[in-house]
Amino acid sequence: MHRHIVIGPPGTGKTTFLKNKVTELVKNNICLPSEIGYFSFTVKAAEEIRDRVAKGSDLSKDELKKEYPYFCTLHSLAYKRLQLQQSQIMDEHDYNDLSRLTGHEYVNKMKKGNGVDISMPTAKSEYQDLINLAYAKFPDDEDRLAKVFRDTTLNNYGARNLIEQMDLDLCKFKKDRGKYEYVDYFTQFLKRKNPPKLKYLFIDEAQDLSVHQWRVVDMIQEIATPIETYVAGDDDQAIFRWAGADIEHFIAMAKDDTNTIIPLTQSYRIPKSVHILATKMAQSISNRIKKHYFPRDEEGTRKVLNIRPLNKGIKEGEWLILCRTHEIVKQVCESLEMYGWLYKRYGHSVINFKYIEAIRAWTKLQNGKSISGDYCHTLYEYMDSTRIKRNYGTFKGNSEEMYNLDMLINNFGLRDTIKLSQTKEVSVKEIAWYDMINAKGFRNRINYLRSIMRSGNKLDDTPRIEVSTIHASKGGERQKVMLITDLSFGPYKSSTENQQGRDDEARVFYVGATRAKEELHIVHRTEGQFEYEPIFFHEKQIR
Protein backbone atom coordinates (compact mmCIF):
# COMPACT_ATOMS: atom_id res chain seq x y z
CA MET A 1 0.00 0.00 0.00
CA HIS A 2 1.24 3.45 -0.89
CA ARG A 3 -0.07 6.58 0.84
CA HIS A 4 -0.17 10.04 -0.75
CA ILE A 5 -0.69 13.15 1.38
CA VAL A 6 -2.21 15.99 -0.65
CA ILE A 7 -1.44 19.32 1.02
CA GLY A 8 -3.77 21.96 -0.37
CA PRO A 9 -4.03 25.55 0.93
CA PRO A 10 -7.32 27.43 0.29
CA GLY A 11 -8.57 27.39 -3.28
CA THR A 12 -5.81 25.13 -4.64
CA GLY A 13 -8.21 22.40 -5.73
CA LYS A 14 -7.80 19.54 -3.24
CA THR A 15 -11.21 18.10 -4.01
CA THR A 16 -10.71 18.55 -7.76
CA PHE A 17 -7.39 16.69 -7.53
CA LEU A 18 -9.07 13.77 -5.77
CA LYS A 19 -11.98 13.83 -8.21
CA ASN A 20 -9.62 13.62 -11.18
CA LYS A 21 -7.85 10.61 -9.65
CA VAL A 22 -11.16 8.85 -9.05
CA THR A 23 -12.34 9.68 -12.59
CA GLU A 24 -9.12 8.22 -14.00
CA LEU A 25 -9.67 4.95 -12.12
CA VAL A 26 -13.28 4.60 -13.29
CA LYS A 27 -12.89 5.76 -16.90
CA ASN A 28 -9.83 3.58 -17.50
CA ASN A 29 -11.47 0.52 -15.90
CA ILE A 30 -8.62 0.21 -13.41
CA CYS A 31 -11.13 -0.84 -10.77
CA LEU A 32 -14.85 -0.97 -10.15
CA PRO A 33 -16.61 2.03 -8.54
CA SER A 34 -17.56 -0.29 -5.67
CA GLU A 35 -13.84 -0.85 -4.98
CA ILE A 36 -13.25 2.87 -4.33
CA GLY A 37 -13.82 4.46 -0.95
CA TYR A 38 -14.28 8.22 -1.08
CA PHE A 39 -14.97 9.67 2.36
CA SER A 40 -15.66 13.34 2.93
CA PHE A 41 -16.70 15.63 5.75
CA THR A 42 -20.33 15.81 4.64
CA VAL A 43 -22.72 13.55 2.79
CA LYS A 44 -23.36 16.30 0.25
CA ALA A 45 -19.66 16.69 -0.60
CA ALA A 46 -19.18 12.96 -1.16
CA GLU A 47 -22.31 12.71 -3.33
CA GLU A 48 -21.21 15.69 -5.43
CA ILE A 49 -17.92 13.95 -6.23
CA ARG A 50 -19.78 10.75 -7.07
CA ASP A 51 -22.12 12.63 -9.40
CA ARG A 52 -19.22 14.44 -11.10
CA VAL A 53 -17.35 11.17 -11.67
CA ALA A 54 -20.50 9.47 -13.00
CA LYS A 55 -21.49 12.46 -15.15
CA GLY A 56 -23.02 11.35 -18.43
CA SER A 57 -24.22 7.99 -17.14
CA ASP A 58 -27.89 7.06 -17.39
CA LEU A 59 -28.02 5.78 -13.82
CA SER A 60 -30.74 7.04 -11.49
CA LYS A 61 -29.86 8.42 -8.05
CA ASP A 62 -30.70 5.09 -6.39
CA GLU A 63 -28.66 3.20 -9.00
CA LEU A 64 -25.71 5.53 -8.43
CA LYS A 65 -25.80 4.76 -4.71
CA LYS A 66 -25.59 1.03 -5.48
CA GLU A 67 -22.88 1.50 -8.12
CA TYR A 68 -20.81 3.81 -5.86
CA PRO A 69 -21.69 2.50 -2.36
CA TYR A 70 -18.68 3.96 -0.55
CA PHE A 71 -18.90 7.59 -1.58
CA CYS A 72 -20.13 8.85 1.77
CA THR A 73 -19.01 9.94 5.23
CA LEU A 74 -17.14 7.64 7.58
CA HIS A 75 -20.16 7.63 9.87
CA SER A 76 -22.35 6.49 7.00
CA LEU A 77 -19.85 3.72 6.25
CA ALA A 78 -19.97 2.47 9.83
CA TYR A 79 -23.78 2.65 9.82
CA LYS A 80 -24.00 0.58 6.61
CA ARG A 81 -21.44 -2.02 7.64
CA LEU A 82 -23.15 -2.51 11.00
CA GLN A 83 -26.44 -2.98 9.11
CA LEU A 84 -28.19 -0.73 11.55
CA GLN A 85 -31.85 0.20 11.24
CA GLN A 86 -33.28 3.63 11.95
CA SER A 87 -35.26 2.15 14.84
CA GLN A 88 -31.96 1.33 16.59
CA ILE A 89 -30.79 4.96 16.63
CA MET A 90 -31.49 7.17 19.63
CA ASP A 91 -34.18 9.67 18.63
CA GLU A 92 -36.15 12.44 20.30
CA HIS A 93 -38.56 10.02 21.95
CA ASP A 94 -35.70 8.01 23.45
CA TYR A 95 -34.08 11.11 24.93
CA ASN A 96 -37.43 12.20 26.33
CA ASP A 97 -37.90 8.77 27.94
CA LEU A 98 -34.41 8.94 29.38
CA SER A 99 -35.06 12.42 30.78
CA ARG A 100 -38.29 11.23 32.39
CA LEU A 101 -36.65 8.17 33.94
CA THR A 102 -33.58 9.94 35.31
CA GLY A 103 -34.78 13.49 35.99
CA HIS A 104 -31.89 14.89 33.92
CA GLU A 105 -32.28 16.92 30.73
CA TYR A 106 -31.31 14.94 27.64
CA VAL A 107 -32.12 16.23 24.18
CA ASN A 108 -31.74 14.93 20.64
CA LYS A 109 -28.16 15.88 19.75
CA MET A 110 -28.13 15.11 16.05
CA LYS A 111 -30.47 16.59 13.47
CA LYS A 112 -31.55 13.94 11.02
CA GLY A 113 -29.96 14.37 7.63
CA ASN A 114 -27.51 17.12 8.56
CA GLY A 115 -24.74 15.13 6.89
CA VAL A 116 -21.92 16.42 9.05
CA ASP A 117 -19.36 13.74 9.77
CA ILE A 118 -18.00 14.96 13.08
CA SER A 119 -19.37 14.70 16.60
CA MET A 120 -20.00 18.37 17.10
CA PRO A 121 -21.82 19.28 20.31
CA THR A 122 -25.24 20.54 19.24
CA ALA A 123 -27.47 19.74 22.19
CA LYS A 124 -29.15 22.30 24.41
CA SER A 125 -27.83 20.37 27.39
CA GLU A 126 -24.28 21.55 28.07
CA TYR A 127 -23.50 18.43 30.10
CA GLN A 128 -24.64 16.15 27.31
CA ASP A 129 -22.43 18.08 24.92
CA LEU A 130 -19.44 17.40 27.14
CA ILE A 131 -20.20 13.68 27.28
CA ASN A 132 -20.30 13.54 23.49
CA LEU A 133 -17.08 15.53 23.18
CA ALA A 134 -15.27 13.35 25.74
CA TYR A 135 -15.95 10.20 23.72
CA ALA A 136 -14.87 11.93 20.49
CA LYS A 137 -11.55 13.16 21.88
CA PHE A 138 -10.59 10.39 24.33
CA PRO A 139 -12.50 7.22 23.34
CA ASP A 140 -10.30 4.78 25.32
CA ASP A 141 -9.55 6.92 28.35
CA GLU A 142 -11.51 6.09 31.50
CA ASP A 143 -10.74 9.62 32.71
CA ARG A 144 -12.20 11.16 29.52
CA LEU A 145 -14.94 13.13 31.29
CA ALA A 146 -12.51 14.68 33.76
CA LYS A 147 -10.13 15.71 30.96
CA VAL A 148 -12.87 17.54 29.07
CA PHE A 149 -14.42 18.90 32.23
CA ARG A 150 -11.20 20.61 33.36
CA ASP A 151 -11.26 22.86 30.30
CA THR A 152 -14.74 24.23 30.98
CA THR A 153 -16.18 26.90 33.23
CA LEU A 154 -18.25 24.22 34.98
CA ASN A 155 -15.37 23.07 37.14
CA ASN A 156 -17.12 22.38 40.42
CA TYR A 157 -17.83 19.23 42.43
CA GLY A 158 -21.62 19.21 41.92
CA ALA A 159 -21.43 19.61 38.15
CA ARG A 160 -18.72 16.93 37.94
CA ASN A 161 -20.88 14.41 39.78
CA LEU A 162 -23.89 15.26 37.64
CA ILE A 163 -22.14 14.78 34.30
CA GLU A 164 -20.70 11.44 35.45
CA GLN A 165 -24.15 10.26 36.54
CA MET A 166 -25.70 11.40 33.24
CA ASP A 167 -23.08 9.42 31.35
CA LEU A 168 -23.79 6.27 33.39
CA ASP A 169 -27.56 6.65 32.92
CA LEU A 170 -27.16 7.20 29.18
CA CYS A 171 -24.91 4.15 28.73
CA LYS A 172 -27.30 1.92 30.72
CA PHE A 173 -30.31 3.16 28.76
CA LYS A 174 -28.66 2.43 25.40
CA LYS A 175 -27.53 -1.02 26.54
CA ASP A 176 -30.96 -1.97 27.91
CA ARG A 177 -32.80 -0.89 24.76
CA GLY A 178 -30.19 -1.81 22.15
CA LYS A 179 -29.81 1.76 20.98
CA TYR A 180 -26.93 3.60 19.31
CA GLU A 181 -25.77 7.19 19.30
CA TYR A 182 -23.74 8.89 16.64
CA VAL A 183 -20.38 8.21 18.32
CA ASP A 184 -21.30 4.55 18.98
CA TYR A 185 -21.16 3.71 15.26
CA PHE A 186 -17.38 3.83 15.28
CA THR A 187 -16.97 1.95 18.55
CA GLN A 188 -18.93 -1.04 17.25
CA PHE A 189 -17.49 -0.86 13.74
CA LEU A 190 -13.95 -0.96 15.09
CA LYS A 191 -14.79 -3.96 17.27
CA ARG A 192 -16.23 -5.98 14.38
CA LYS A 193 -13.35 -5.17 11.98
CA ASN A 194 -15.31 -5.74 8.80
CA PRO A 195 -14.39 -2.89 6.43
CA PRO A 196 -15.31 -3.19 2.75
CA LYS A 197 -12.71 -4.57 0.32
CA LEU A 198 -11.41 -1.37 -1.21
CA LYS A 199 -8.62 -1.10 -3.76
CA TYR A 200 -8.38 2.69 -3.53
CA LEU A 201 -9.05 4.93 -0.56
CA PHE A 202 -9.66 8.70 -0.67
CA ILE A 203 -10.02 10.93 2.40
CA ASP A 204 -11.00 14.58 1.91
CA GLU A 205 -10.80 17.34 4.56
CA ALA A 206 -8.56 15.04 6.58
CA GLN A 207 -7.55 17.76 9.05
CA ASP A 208 -11.06 17.57 10.54
CA LEU A 209 -11.06 13.85 11.35
CA SER A 210 -11.52 12.81 14.98
CA VAL A 211 -9.60 10.10 16.83
CA HIS A 212 -12.35 7.57 16.06
CA GLN A 213 -12.37 8.46 12.38
CA TRP A 214 -8.62 8.09 12.06
CA ARG A 215 -8.91 4.66 13.65
CA VAL A 216 -11.46 3.67 11.04
CA VAL A 217 -9.12 4.87 8.29
CA ASP A 218 -6.24 2.92 9.84
CA MET A 219 -8.40 -0.22 10.10
CA ILE A 220 -9.39 0.01 6.43
CA GLN A 221 -5.74 0.35 5.43
CA GLU A 222 -4.71 -2.56 7.64
CA ILE A 223 -7.46 -5.06 6.80
CA ALA A 224 -8.66 -4.03 3.32
CA THR A 225 -5.06 -3.21 2.25
CA PRO A 226 -5.92 -0.76 -0.55
CA ILE A 227 -3.35 -0.37 -3.31
CA GLU A 228 -3.20 3.38 -2.83
CA THR A 229 -4.52 5.87 -0.31
CA TYR A 230 -4.94 9.60 -0.96
CA VAL A 231 -5.37 11.82 2.10
CA ALA A 232 -6.09 15.50 1.34
CA GLY A 233 -6.24 18.39 3.76
CA ASP A 234 -4.78 21.61 5.10
CA ASP A 235 -3.83 21.82 8.77
CA ASP A 236 -4.07 25.63 8.65
CA GLN A 237 -7.81 25.17 8.05
CA ALA A 238 -8.34 22.76 10.95
CA ILE A 239 -11.02 24.59 12.95
CA PHE A 240 -12.86 21.74 14.67
CA ARG A 241 -10.43 20.81 17.44
CA TRP A 242 -13.07 21.94 19.95
CA ALA A 243 -15.33 19.22 18.51
CA GLY A 244 -12.76 16.45 18.75
CA ALA A 245 -10.77 16.85 15.51
CA ASP A 246 -7.26 15.34 15.79
CA ILE A 247 -5.14 17.89 13.90
CA GLU A 248 -1.84 16.44 15.12
CA HIS A 249 -2.54 13.10 13.42
CA PHE A 250 -2.72 14.74 10.01
CA ILE A 251 0.38 16.85 10.68
CA ALA A 252 2.31 13.71 11.72
CA MET A 253 1.28 11.93 8.50
CA ALA A 254 2.59 14.83 6.42
CA LYS A 255 5.92 14.67 8.24
CA ASP A 256 6.23 10.88 7.84
CA ASP A 257 8.97 10.17 5.28
CA THR A 258 7.31 6.93 4.19
CA ASN A 259 4.42 8.89 2.69
CA THR A 260 4.51 10.77 -0.61
CA ILE A 261 3.71 14.46 -0.27
CA ILE A 262 1.79 16.09 -3.11
CA PRO A 263 1.80 19.87 -2.58
CA LEU A 264 -0.78 21.97 -4.43
CA THR A 265 0.80 25.36 -4.89
CA GLN A 266 -1.55 27.50 -7.00
CA SER A 267 -4.64 29.06 -5.42
CA TYR A 268 -7.40 29.75 -7.92
CA ARG A 269 -9.35 31.80 -5.37
CA ILE A 270 -7.11 34.11 -3.35
CA PRO A 271 -5.84 37.45 -4.75
CA LYS A 272 -2.43 38.88 -3.82
CA SER A 273 -3.55 41.25 -1.06
CA VAL A 274 -5.49 38.53 0.77
CA HIS A 275 -2.62 36.08 0.26
CA ILE A 276 -0.22 38.42 2.10
CA LEU A 277 -2.54 38.55 5.10
CA ALA A 278 -3.28 34.82 5.04
CA THR A 279 0.42 33.97 4.95
CA LYS A 280 1.13 36.16 7.98
CA MET A 281 -1.75 34.57 9.87
CA ALA A 282 -0.66 31.02 9.04
CA GLN A 283 2.93 31.73 10.06
CA SER A 284 1.73 32.74 13.52
CA ILE A 285 0.59 29.13 14.15
CA SER A 286 3.20 27.25 16.19
CA ASN A 287 2.62 23.63 15.13
CA ARG A 288 1.91 23.39 11.41
CA ILE A 289 3.05 21.97 8.10
CA LYS A 290 5.22 24.52 6.36
CA LYS A 291 3.90 25.25 2.91
CA HIS A 292 4.19 27.75 0.11
CA TYR A 293 1.57 28.58 -2.49
CA PHE A 294 0.88 31.28 -5.06
CA PRO A 295 -2.09 33.65 -5.27
CA ARG A 296 -4.01 34.68 -8.36
CA ASP A 297 -2.47 37.41 -10.50
CA GLU A 298 -5.14 39.92 -9.45
CA GLU A 299 -4.20 42.27 -6.62
CA GLY A 300 -7.61 42.27 -4.97
CA THR A 301 -8.67 44.56 -2.13
CA ARG A 302 -8.02 44.34 1.60
CA LYS A 303 -9.32 46.89 4.08
CA VAL A 304 -9.17 47.04 7.86
CA LEU A 305 -11.98 49.10 9.36
CA ASN A 306 -12.95 50.16 12.87
CA ILE A 307 -16.69 50.23 12.21
CA ARG A 308 -19.35 48.00 10.75
CA PRO A 309 -20.30 49.75 7.51
CA LEU A 310 -23.42 47.66 6.95
CA ASN A 311 -25.41 50.48 5.36
CA LYS A 312 -22.86 52.14 3.07
CA GLY A 313 -20.34 49.36 2.60
CA ILE A 314 -22.52 46.64 1.07
CA LYS A 315 -24.74 48.51 -1.37
CA GLU A 316 -23.41 46.57 -4.36
CA GLY A 317 -22.13 43.09 -5.13
CA GLU A 318 -22.39 39.61 -3.63
CA TRP A 319 -21.33 39.59 0.03
CA LEU A 320 -20.49 36.98 2.62
CA ILE A 321 -20.47 38.45 6.13
CA LEU A 322 -18.57 36.18 8.52
CA CYS A 323 -18.79 36.35 12.31
CA ARG A 324 -16.93 34.56 15.09
CA THR A 325 -20.04 33.74 17.10
CA HIS A 326 -23.76 33.10 16.67
CA GLU A 327 -24.39 36.12 18.91
CA ILE A 328 -22.64 38.42 16.46
CA VAL A 329 -24.55 36.81 13.56
CA LYS A 330 -27.75 37.76 15.37
CA GLN A 331 -26.58 41.37 15.80
CA VAL A 332 -25.55 41.67 12.15
CA CYS A 333 -28.92 40.30 11.01
CA GLU A 334 -30.73 42.87 13.15
CA SER A 335 -28.71 45.66 11.51
CA LEU A 336 -29.39 44.31 8.02
CA GLU A 337 -33.11 44.23 8.73
CA MET A 338 -33.06 47.78 10.06
CA TYR A 339 -31.52 48.98 6.78
CA GLY A 340 -33.85 46.84 4.66
CA TRP A 341 -31.26 44.56 3.11
CA LEU A 342 -32.32 41.18 1.76
CA TYR A 343 -30.06 38.43 3.09
CA LYS A 344 -29.58 34.75 3.77
CA ARG A 345 -28.59 33.34 7.14
CA TYR A 346 -26.51 30.16 7.04
CA GLY A 347 -27.45 29.69 3.39
CA HIS A 348 -31.22 30.00 3.85
CA SER A 349 -33.55 32.91 3.10
CA VAL A 350 -35.00 34.55 6.22
CA ILE A 351 -38.26 35.47 4.47
CA ASN A 352 -41.02 32.91 4.20
CA PHE A 353 -42.08 32.88 0.54
CA LYS A 354 -45.73 32.54 1.61
CA TYR A 355 -45.48 35.98 3.22
CA ILE A 356 -44.59 37.41 -0.19
CA GLU A 357 -47.47 35.53 -1.81
CA ALA A 358 -49.93 36.96 0.73
CA ILE A 359 -48.70 40.54 0.19
CA ARG A 360 -48.80 40.12 -3.57
CA ALA A 361 -52.32 38.68 -3.41
CA TRP A 362 -53.69 41.57 -1.35
CA THR A 363 -52.00 44.15 -3.60
CA LYS A 364 -53.62 42.58 -6.69
CA LEU A 365 -57.04 42.58 -5.05
CA GLN A 366 -56.73 46.28 -4.16
CA ASN A 367 -55.78 47.04 -7.74
CA GLY A 368 -59.02 45.45 -8.97
CA LYS A 369 -57.44 42.19 -10.17
CA SER A 370 -58.52 38.62 -9.44
CA ILE A 371 -56.45 35.97 -7.70
CA SER A 372 -56.63 32.18 -7.71
CA GLY A 373 -58.16 30.12 -4.96
CA ASP A 374 -54.68 28.97 -3.89
CA TYR A 375 -53.62 32.59 -3.40
CA CYS A 376 -56.82 33.16 -1.41
CA HIS A 377 -55.93 30.26 0.88
CA THR A 378 -52.51 31.81 1.54
CA LEU A 379 -54.04 35.25 2.11
CA TYR A 380 -56.60 34.00 4.60
CA GLU A 381 -53.90 32.00 6.41
CA TYR A 382 -51.95 35.17 7.23
CA MET A 383 -54.84 37.58 7.58
CA ASP A 384 -55.58 39.06 10.99
CA SER A 385 -58.54 37.21 12.51
CA THR A 386 -60.46 40.47 13.07
CA ARG A 387 -60.55 41.00 9.28
CA ILE A 388 -62.59 37.88 8.52
CA LYS A 389 -65.72 36.33 9.99
CA ARG A 390 -65.06 33.47 12.36
CA ASN A 391 -66.55 30.73 10.19
CA TYR A 392 -64.29 31.78 7.31
CA GLY A 393 -61.01 31.44 9.16
CA THR A 394 -60.05 29.03 6.41
CA PHE A 395 -60.94 29.97 2.85
CA LYS A 396 -63.76 27.72 1.59
CA GLY A 397 -63.44 28.46 -2.13
CA ASN A 398 -62.22 26.40 -5.11
CA SER A 399 -58.47 26.48 -5.68
CA GLU A 400 -58.94 26.41 -9.47
CA GLU A 401 -61.26 29.42 -9.67
CA MET A 402 -60.48 33.17 -9.66
CA TYR A 403 -61.77 35.66 -7.08
CA ASN A 404 -61.85 39.45 -6.82
CA LEU A 405 -62.16 41.60 -3.71
CA ASP A 406 -65.93 42.10 -4.04
CA MET A 407 -66.46 38.33 -4.24
CA LEU A 408 -64.45 37.78 -1.06
CA ILE A 409 -66.48 40.48 0.75
CA ASN A 410 -69.87 39.34 -0.46
CA ASN A 411 -69.47 35.55 -0.44
CA PHE A 412 -66.39 34.45 1.50
CA GLY A 413 -66.42 36.09 4.90
CA LEU A 414 -64.13 39.08 4.32
CA ARG A 415 -65.48 42.04 6.32
CA ASP A 416 -66.33 45.11 4.25
CA THR A 417 -65.24 47.59 6.92
CA ILE A 418 -62.72 47.42 9.75
CA LYS A 419 -62.80 49.41 12.97
CA LEU A 420 -59.26 50.78 13.31
CA SER A 421 -60.06 52.83 16.41
CA GLN A 422 -62.97 53.65 18.70
CA THR A 423 -64.27 56.25 16.28
CA LYS A 424 -62.93 55.31 12.88
CA GLU A 425 -64.11 52.60 10.48
CA VAL A 426 -62.32 52.06 7.18
CA SER A 427 -63.22 50.05 4.10
CA VAL A 428 -61.00 46.99 3.72
CA LYS A 429 -60.29 48.19 0.18
CA GLU A 430 -58.30 51.08 1.70
CA ILE A 431 -56.27 49.08 4.21
CA ALA A 432 -52.55 48.58 3.47
CA TRP A 433 -51.11 45.06 3.40
CA TYR A 434 -49.17 45.57 6.63
CA ASP A 435 -52.41 46.30 8.49
CA MET A 436 -54.42 43.62 6.72
CA ILE A 437 -51.96 40.72 6.80
CA ASN A 438 -50.91 40.50 10.39
CA ALA A 439 -51.14 37.05 11.92
CA LYS A 440 -49.46 33.64 12.54
CA GLY A 441 -45.82 34.57 12.64
CA PHE A 442 -46.21 37.30 10.05
CA ARG A 443 -46.54 40.05 12.65
CA ASN A 444 -42.92 39.99 13.81
CA ARG A 445 -41.64 40.26 10.20
CA ILE A 446 -43.75 43.25 9.12
CA ASN A 447 -41.21 45.92 10.07
CA TYR A 448 -38.47 44.10 8.17
CA LEU A 449 -40.66 43.60 5.09
CA ARG A 450 -41.64 47.27 5.09
CA SER A 451 -38.00 48.24 5.52
CA ILE A 452 -37.08 46.18 2.44
CA MET A 453 -39.70 47.93 0.34
CA ARG A 454 -38.75 51.41 1.60
CA SER A 455 -35.13 50.74 0.62
CA GLY A 456 -36.21 50.16 -2.98
CA ASN A 457 -35.66 46.39 -2.98
CA LYS A 458 -38.21 43.81 -4.09
CA LEU A 459 -39.31 41.14 -1.64
CA ASP A 460 -38.73 38.34 -4.13
CA ASP A 461 -35.27 39.51 -5.23
CA THR A 462 -32.47 36.99 -4.81
CA PRO A 463 -30.53 37.92 -1.64
CA ARG A 464 -26.99 39.00 -2.50
CA ILE A 465 -25.86 39.01 1.14
CA GLU A 466 -25.25 35.95 3.27
CA VAL A 467 -24.46 35.98 7.00
CA SER A 468 -22.75 33.06 8.67
CA THR A 469 -20.30 32.03 11.36
CA ILE A 470 -16.81 31.27 10.11
CA HIS A 471 -17.23 27.60 11.01
CA ALA A 472 -20.43 27.27 8.98
CA SER A 473 -18.80 28.91 5.94
CA LYS A 474 -15.92 26.44 5.64
CA GLY A 475 -15.50 25.31 2.05
CA GLY A 476 -17.38 28.29 0.62
CA GLU A 477 -16.16 31.38 -1.19
CA ARG A 478 -17.51 34.76 -2.34
CA GLN A 479 -16.34 37.74 -4.39
CA LYS A 480 -16.64 40.07 -1.39
CA VAL A 481 -16.16 39.01 2.21
CA MET A 482 -16.68 41.07 5.36
CA LEU A 483 -14.95 39.48 8.35
CA ILE A 484 -16.08 40.69 11.78
CA THR A 485 -13.31 39.85 14.21
CA ASP A 486 -14.93 40.47 17.57
CA LEU A 487 -13.96 37.95 20.28
CA SER A 488 -15.83 39.50 23.18
CA PHE A 489 -18.66 36.94 23.23
CA GLY A 490 -18.54 33.43 24.60
CA PRO A 491 -15.37 31.61 25.64
CA TYR A 492 -13.30 32.88 22.73
CA LYS A 493 -11.72 35.85 24.48
CA SER A 494 -10.21 33.48 27.05
CA SER A 495 -9.13 30.93 24.45
CA THR A 496 -6.10 33.05 23.53
CA GLU A 497 -4.50 32.62 26.96
CA ASN A 498 -2.39 29.63 25.81
CA GLN A 499 -0.54 28.82 22.59
CA GLN A 500 -2.96 26.13 21.45
CA GLY A 501 -5.84 28.54 21.93
CA ARG A 502 -4.05 31.25 19.95
CA ASP A 503 -3.26 28.73 17.21
CA ASP A 504 -6.91 27.67 17.03
CA GLU A 505 -8.11 31.28 16.79
CA ALA A 506 -5.54 32.01 14.08
CA ARG A 507 -6.85 29.04 12.10
CA VAL A 508 -10.46 30.18 12.45
CA PHE A 509 -9.75 33.66 11.11
CA TYR A 510 -7.46 32.24 8.45
CA VAL A 511 -10.41 30.22 7.16
CA GLY A 512 -12.63 33.31 7.26
CA ALA A 513 -10.16 35.56 5.43
CA THR A 514 -9.46 33.01 2.69
CA ARG A 515 -13.11 32.84 1.58
CA ALA A 516 -12.53 36.12 -0.33
CA LYS A 517 -12.01 35.97 -4.11
CA GLU A 518 -11.72 39.73 -4.72
CA GLU A 519 -12.33 41.92 -1.67
CA LEU A 520 -11.71 41.31 2.03
CA HIS A 521 -13.09 43.84 4.52
CA ILE A 522 -11.88 43.21 8.07
CA VAL A 523 -14.08 44.90 10.64
CA HIS A 524 -13.19 45.74 14.23
CA ARG A 525 -16.32 46.43 16.24
CA THR A 526 -14.95 49.06 18.61
CA GLU A 527 -11.59 50.38 19.72
CA GLY A 528 -12.43 49.39 23.26
CA GLN A 529 -12.56 45.70 22.33
CA PHE A 530 -9.17 45.54 20.64
CA GLU A 531 -7.79 43.58 23.58
CA TYR A 532 -9.79 40.65 22.29
CA GLU A 533 -8.90 41.07 18.62
CA PRO A 534 -6.46 38.74 16.89
CA ILE A 535 -3.30 40.83 16.73
CA PHE A 536 -2.54 39.76 13.17
CA PHE A 537 -5.49 41.74 11.89
CA HIS A 538 -3.99 45.10 12.72
CA GLU A 539 -2.77 46.76 9.57
CA LYS A 540 0.69 47.38 10.97
CA GLN A 541 1.09 43.64 11.43
CA ILE A 542 0.34 42.65 7.87
CA ARG A 543 2.09 45.20 5.68
Image (tube, grey):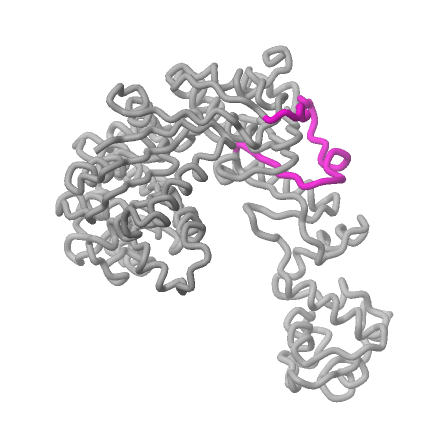
Front residue of 274/387: it is 274
Q: Magenta stretch: residue 315 in it?
A: yes
Q: Residue at x 29, y 26 (%)?
A: 249
Q: Residue at x 62, y 60 (%)?
A: 352
Tally of numbered discs? 0
Q: What secondary structure predominates along the stretch shown in magenta?
A: loop
Q: Position of residue 517 (x, y in %)?
A: 61, 33
Residue 6, relative to residue 498: is it above or below?
below
Front residue of 261/288: it is 261
Which residue ends up furthest to the left in the rendered image? 192
Q: Position of residue 353 (x, y in %)?
A: 64, 62
In the image, the segment drawn in magenta is: 296-324
Q: Residue at x 57, y 22 (%)?
A: 275
Residue 368, relative to residue 124: is it above or below?
below
The answer to whether residue 294 shows anywhere in this view is: yes
Q: Magenta stretch: residue 32 in it?
A: no
User: Which quarter of the figure is the N terminus placed in?
Assistant: top left
Q: Quarter of the image holding residue 257? A: top left
Which residue ends up furthest to the front in the rendered image? 28
Front residue of 389/469: it is 469
Q: Position of residue 394 (x, y in %)?
A: 62, 79
User: Which quarter of the figure is the C terminus placed in?
Assistant: top right
Q: Position of residue 161 (x, y in %)?
A: 23, 36
Residue 86, relative to residue 430: is it above or below?
above
Q: Is residue 116 left or right of residue 528?
A: left
Q: Residue at x 15, y 56 (%)?
A: 176
